[in-house]
Amino acid sequence: MDSVIQFNHISKKYRLGMTRTSIPTILYQSVEKTFRRKKLKQADENSLWALRDVSFDLKKGESMALVGSNGAGKTTILKLLAKITKPTSGSFETEGKLSALIELGSGFHPDLSGRDNIYLNGTILGLKKSEIKQRFDEIVAFSELERFIDTPLKRYSSGMAVRLGFAVAASIDPDILLVDEVLAVGDAAFRQKCMQRIQNLLENGSSIIFVSHNLWLVQAVCQKGILLDKGQVILDGLINEVVDRYD
């Protein structure tokens, strides 16, 4: 099988403290130029390595879970793959259409209706207007939000927003689907429905990277897993082995 994701020796460092665009930071950086040695000494103290030399590959039709405690680096990997952020070092390659459901409400506008947000989010995910129109009824039916589809999203509960987001993300039949924790918000019946949709995608050749603290859900969805701790890979193997090690 061909790899749809190749993640090669990726490291990601975040700078802690003030943002780069704040006025105090700009003043600080201008003064700091005269204190180069001090800056180098404090560099590590002001930085956080979210990932350190992480490598893996995912083949077509495979499902993989990223497992670990909060801050282990799971969401950072997904954000890199979705090109929300860039690696500090290393490189990665993806093949095919990628769809990401990473953050609750990402790609939605609270003042727009559910209907308008389907078109907005679908466009962000790379669909043409004609394609969204063709799939619109299917998306609404999956979300079970027919009654509220013309209501502004800001009046939706978090669970309703997840329903709509997952319905749009999964409707494009992606080659790669990234899912991060969002199913924890939905009710049991909807989670089961999402799992069935994920299984259908896998059977049709899609690849899934899944993040959840629900280890039962992880084992039900994924074949393999990676255990992360403080940005480093502890174990890369079958999902049962990874979950057993994490426990």
Image: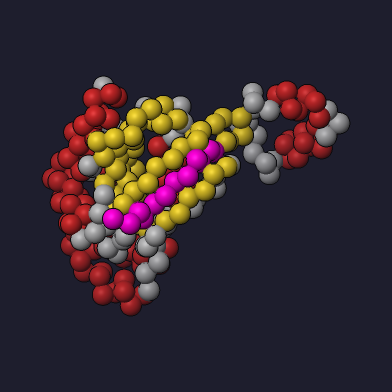
**Which sits in the foreground, 2 or 42?**
2
Residue at figure coordinates x 18%, y 33% from the top left: 216
Compared to residue 30, the image places residue 198 above or below, namely below
Q: Quadrant of residue 169?
A: bottom left
Residue at figure coordinates x 32%, y 46% from the top left: 209
Asked whether, in this view, residue 221 is left or right of residue 100, the answer is left
Counting every numbered tag in the picture gives: 0
* Residue most extreme to the front: 1
11 part of magenta stretch: yes
The residues colored magenta run 1-12
* Residue most extreme to the right: 34
**Which sits in the foreground, 201 or 128?**
201
- Report whether residue 81 is seen: yes
Asked whether, in this view, residue 47 is left or right of residue 29, the answer is left
Q: Quadrant of residue 189?
A: top left
Q: Quadrant of residue 242?
A: top left
Residue at figure coordinates x 78%, y 24% from the top left: 38
126 part of magenta stretch: no
In the rendered image, residue 36, in percent from the top left (x then y), is placed at 81, 30
Q: Where's the N terminus, which quadrant?
A: bottom left
Residue at figure coordinates x 48%, y 50% from the top left: 92
In the rendered image, residue 181, in percent from the top left (x then y), is placed at 31, 40
In the rendered image, residue 106, in percent from the top left (x then y), is placed at 41, 51
**Which sits in the foreground, 73 or 92?**
92
Type of secondary structure dominating the magenta stretch: strand
